[in-house]
Amino acid sequence: MPHVPKTWQVLGCLCTAAALAGAPLAQASEQTRRSVAFLTGPSQGDAADIARSYLEQGAPAKSLAGGDHARLEVQNRSVTQHNGTTHLRFVQKVHGLEVANAPLSVNVSARGEVINQGGRLLAVAESSVPAPQPALGAREAVLAAAERLGLETSGPLVETKSAVRSATRTEFFGGAISTSRIPASLKYFATDAGALRLVWDLVIETPDHQHLWNVFVDAANGEILDRHDWVARETYQVYAFPKESPSDGPR
């Protein structure tokens, strides 16, 4: 007998029970729907407004309800066509700058129910955070990161003439530091204690192609607060062709 997913087994039982009791199939479907524990009930309005209202009402600080808080902006939005679920990714901004490591994801059903939430909402009053005044510029941050990563820094580091250049965003030709251009964006970084540090968000591809570093450099002292290597290094045991399974021989 083929395996039947548990969800379909439950739905089948409900449909059978509904038929025996003379209840319509739609009522059985509604019973199944109620068994799913969504975070809110149905609501009218745009999915982003529904999600934002839910986040702010459940915020851990009263300041979030008063407007003096990290602003929530929709970074990405998509809809699953077969069921109408809206998938939202928010970024939190303070003084117009993104908090790099505090994204939020919220899924909202076609009926306006908040299905689930991922990430954390920062309880940060904007008035408590000093205006962004980096002691290190983007160039100094790149050089500080390269030195701490053990990369060559003697070559020229030339800023591009890209249209994205501004006081908070620019990029550099990689030179001896990176084989690709190095984008630099001024952002905030949330520490484990909940404080915000002003950082330069950089991406550096090492000349040996062994690392693609995303680093967050403290804009006050050049310290690397966090870094991630986007180059994946995984090892696997596989079955050499033409083997297809454990019964065909060892890996």
Image (spheres, helix red, strand yellow):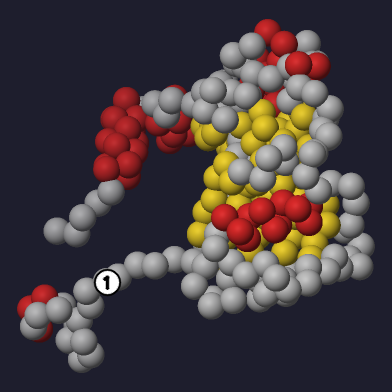
Q: Nearer the viewer, residue 96 or 245?
A: 96
Q: Residue sitting at 90 percent across and 51 percent down?
A: 166
Quadrant of the rendered image containing residue 51: top right
- Considering only vertical position in the picture, is 3 above or below 95? below
Residue type at tag 1: Tyr
The quarter of the image holding the N terminus is bottom left
Horizontal placement of 130 versus 4: left or right?
right
**Percent position of residue 224, x then y:** 59, 46
Quadrant of the rendered image containing residue 90: top right
Q: Residue sitting at 42 percent across and 29 percent down?
A: 36
Quadrant of the rendered image containing residue 147: bottom right
Instruction: Please identify the residue farthest to the front as the structure is shown.
Output: 154
Packing grade of label 1 (10 A; few <14, some 14-19, many >=20) is few
What residue is disc 1 on? 236
Horizontal placement of 27 versus 239: left or right?
right
Q: Nearer the viewer, residue 220 or 193?
A: 220
- Considering only vertical position in the picture, is 236 above or below 166? below
**Percent position of residue 123, x then y:** 64, 18
Q: Residue sitting at 55 percent across and 59 percent down?
A: 149
**Percent position of residue 52, x then y:** 70, 26
- Considering only vertical position in the picture, is 168 above or below 151? above
Q: Secondary structure at mark 1?
A: loop
Q: Is residue 75 visible?
A: no
